Image (cartoon, rainbow, N blue to C red):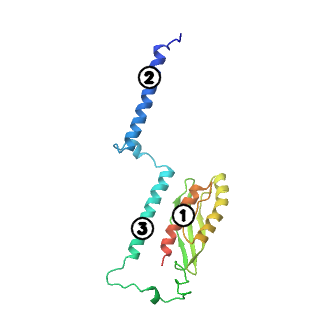
């Protein structure tokens, strides 16, 4: 015959299970749209910071794209055939999609530090993406970034945009690189 635990152990077990159930129900209630809690005023984690920054950047890009593609009242947009510039096989202009020069992007949080990129445009194309700042305090960050930075730069040059694949093991640096480069390329747009 099995013995029953003493009342104090049974009470503690019931209390523990009750707290676990209440915590789960409360968590589900908040996800379903419950009222905000004190946790909503807690510091933002790096992942949340990236999501918020990325969302804001995408909204800004959408607004810039919409405003630059919409014709302004009283202005006329030249047709591609009337646009001066060298043509190749009747296609788009060869000069590229950016204005030549150097454009510094906004700093972006990379959890262990900040990433800031300068886009160098030559011949209307991305010629280089120079890291002005990157996480460099911890030895692990230095090692990871020494491996990731050349790969990210090469991918940006190849893609001719900030839409590059992230480097495995350097997720925070990759995301911050994309954000900073995108903000630089907005300044370089024709």
Q: Is residue 105 above or below residue 71?
A: above
- How dense is the environment of label 3, judged by Cα within 10 Å: few (below 14), some, or many (20 and up)? few
Q: Is residue 137 above or below residue 150?
A: above
Q: Are marks 1 and 2 in contact (CB under 8 Å)?
A: no
- Residue at the image point whose x is 52% and y is 88% from the top: 85
Helix, strand or loop for disc 2: helix
Q: Position of residue 122 (x, y in %)?
A: 58, 79
Q: Are marks 1 and 3 in contact (CB under 8 Å)?
A: no
Q: Position of residue 147 (x, y in %)?
A: 67, 60
Label 1 belongs to which residue? 178
Q: Position of residue 81 (x, y in %)?
A: 46, 88
Choose top left, top right, bottom left or bottom right for residue 145: bottom right
Helix, strand or loop for disc 3: helix
Q: CA distance from mark 1 to mark 3?
A: 16 Å
Mark sitting earlier along the chain (1/2): 2
Label 2 belongs to which residue? 14
Helix, strand or loop for disc 1: helix
Q: Is residue 94 above or below residue 144?
A: below
Q: Which mark is residue 67?
A: none
Question: In front here: 50 or 137?
Answer: 50
């Amino acid at each position: 015959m099995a013995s029953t635990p003493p009342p104090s152990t049974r009470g503690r077990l019931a209390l523990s299970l009750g707290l676990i159930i209440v915590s789960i129900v409360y968590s589900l209630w908040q996800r379903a749209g419950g009222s905000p809690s004190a946790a909503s005023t807690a510091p933002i984690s790096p992942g949340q910071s990236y999501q918020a920054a990325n969302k804001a950047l995408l909204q800004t890009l959408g607004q810039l794209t919409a405003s630059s593609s919409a014709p302004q009242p009283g202005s006329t947009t030249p047709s591609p055939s009337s646009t001066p510039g060298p043509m190749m096989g009747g296609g788009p202009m060869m000069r590229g999609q950016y204005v030549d020069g150097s454009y510094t992007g906004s700093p972006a949080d990379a959890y262990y530090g900040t990433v800031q990129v300068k886009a160098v445009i030559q011949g209307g194309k991305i010629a280089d993406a120079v890291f002005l700042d990157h996480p460099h305090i911890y030895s692990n960050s230095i090692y990871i970034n020494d491996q990731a930075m050349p790969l990210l730069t090469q991918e940006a040059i190849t893609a001719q945009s900030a839409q590059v694949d992230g480097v495995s093991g350097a997720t925070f640096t990759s995301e911050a690189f994309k954000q900073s480069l995108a903000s630089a390329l907005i300044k370089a747009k024709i």
